[in-house]
Amino acid sequence: MKITVLQCDIVWANPEANRERFDEAIDNNPDADLYVLPEMFSTGFCTNPEGIAESTDGETLSWMKQKAKATGAAIAGSLAVTDGEKYYNRFYFVKPNGSVAYYDKKHLFTYGGEHHHFTAGDKRVIVEHCGVRILLEICYDLRFPVWSRNRGDYDMILYVASWPTSRVMAWGALLVARAIENQCYVAGVNRVGSDPSCQYCGGTVVINPYGHTIAQCSMGQECEASAIIDMEALHAFREKFPVLNDADTIM
């Protein structure tokens, strides 16, 4: 499977402008099987979603469906969504056939006030695409390894993020740790630019199960990177060095 990760600036609270930006980025990087966009890619990381969040059948999800069909690739990224009377930081994974899976962020960023308006999810979500089982995670989830512990049920983790420059060293270290400890591929997709609260420098990478970076975006720049997820190599590594067989039982 070929994955392309998109590290872009995000126009604050302007979904139309951001859809156009990511539409162009995808068109300029054809032939991927999966495109991954950052956290809240249509608005920026808004902790106060009133008047910004989209409905569950909003224009950005419709765009994701159209783009997935047009490219023959899955499109993945999170949005601020209103569902009923609640708001969610919702990670959509849209396949070319129109099917949609989603994960609601479990660990809300209390330091930034996300918990005051958003509702936390309570379900781990794993999707299958091109023979790869993929765990969906969002930003702050990266700091909680028990939540993302590999139970033998996935091959890759996607982390979409708005992770600030001030803590980017932790971002890089934790992504490597998640890949090594879970014996899986990890893609961490972060934004660049700024919003009313933070500066962002990216650090978007794809990491293999050994903890080696196999694709990365230049720090501080809008760019894209691609990598091949080699399932034969992953299976061979797990068979040769079956670490997950000795994992602690999750209580």
Image: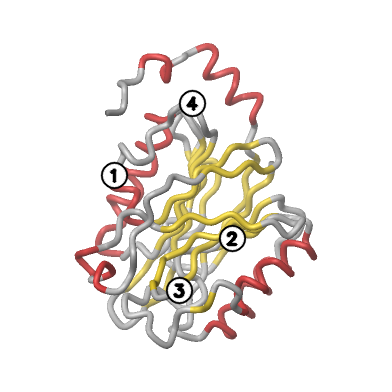
C-alpha distance separating marks 2 and 4? 30 Å
Q: Nearer the viewer, mark 2 or mark 1?
A: 1
Disc 3, SS: loop
C-alpha distance separating marks 1 and 3? 28 Å
Q: Position of residue 94 (x, y in %)?
A: 65, 58
Instruction: From the viewer's perspective, tell me whether residue 168 is left or right of residue 43.
Output: left
Q: Amino acid at mark 1?
A: Phe
User: Residue 37 occupies which quadrant of the picture?
Assistant: bottom right
C-alpha distance separating marks 2 and 3? 35 Å
Count of numbered labels shown in the rendering = 4
User: Residue 50 occupies which quadrant of the picture?
Assistant: bottom left
- What residue does disc 1 label? 144
What residue is drawn where x is 57% and y is 56%?
5
C-alpha distance separating marks 3 and 4? 34 Å
Instruction: From the viewer's perspective, tell me whether residue 8 is left or right of residue 166.
Output: right
Compared with residue 212, is residue 97 higher up or lower down, i.e. above or below?
below
Disc 1, SS: loop
Disc sitting over residue 84 in the figure: 3
- What residue does disc 2 label? 224
Instruction: From the viewer's perspective, tell me whether residue 144 is left or right of residue 65.
Output: left
- What residue does disc 4 label? 152
- Specify which label sits upstream in the sequence, 2 or 3: 3
Q: Nearer the viewer, mark 2 or mark 3?
A: 3
C-alpha distance separating marks 2 and 1? 27 Å
What residue is drawn where x is 19% and y is 65%?
111
